[in-house]
Image (cartoon, rainbow, N blue to C red):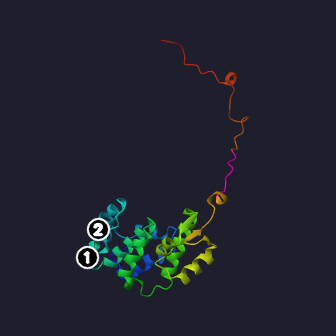
Amino acid sequence: YQFNPAFFQTTVTAQILLKALTNLPHTDFTLCKCMIDQAHVSAMTCVCGGALLLGTPTPLTLLLGGQEERPIRQILYLGELLETCHFQSFWQALDENMELLDGITGFEDSVRKFICHVVGITYQHIDRWLLAEMLGDLSEAQLKVWMSKYGWTEPEPGRIFICNQEESIKPKNIVEKIDFDSGFWGAGDLPVLSLGDPP
């Protein structure tokens, strides 16, 4: 579509973007987004980008613009919510637009996997209600499945232990490979430059 914008198809583009969202935190979604002609996403960038910078996600109803590109704008908005960790807003917006997921199997679980990744690198402890809400208002049984999948425990009621972040820090040894014998001159070894006779 980048080189042949005349062949642009909204439904195909929407499916590609949704599939790319299932691969977060990898950069597939960003790469796909960059390949779409700006005419199809300009309203989204102006309205949604500014609102999210202020920390207040914009409702999808404000992003309608042209009806043909509406699904693309909605998916870009959903992606923006995920990339900025507005997980509760993401699930609300998705509930209002479930028709976007027609033909995409495993989308919600892929998003939950991404959210668990973010939680795992961000939190040491998290409230049980907050985790359930971030994962899309999961039932008790569903939450236990995701907790066991990631090895998270509940040492005290209502509080989930994710991991000890201090134990997961991996120090990196930086080795400088500079040979001081080759390429460095001592003060007495500097070449003398002749500027010629003064005028």
> 174 left or right of 138?
right
Q: Position of residue 116 (x, y in %)?
A: 55, 71
Residue span colored magenta: 169-175
Number of numbered discs overlaid on the protein picture:
2
Residue placed furthest toward the top = 199
Q: Amino acid at mark 2?
A: Ala
**Circle 2 Cα neighbour tier, 10 Å, few/some/many (<14 / 14–19 / ≥20):** some
Q: Secondary structure at mark 1?
A: loop
Residue at image coords 59%, 76%: 147
Q: Position of residue 19 (x, y in %)?
A: 47, 78
> 88 left or right of 66?
right
Which image quarter: residue 181? Answer: top right
> 166 left or right of 51?
right
Residue corresponding to mark 2: 43
Q: Nearer the viewer, residue 2 or 193?
A: 2
Report the quarter where the N terminus lies: bottom left
Residue corresponding to mark 1: 66
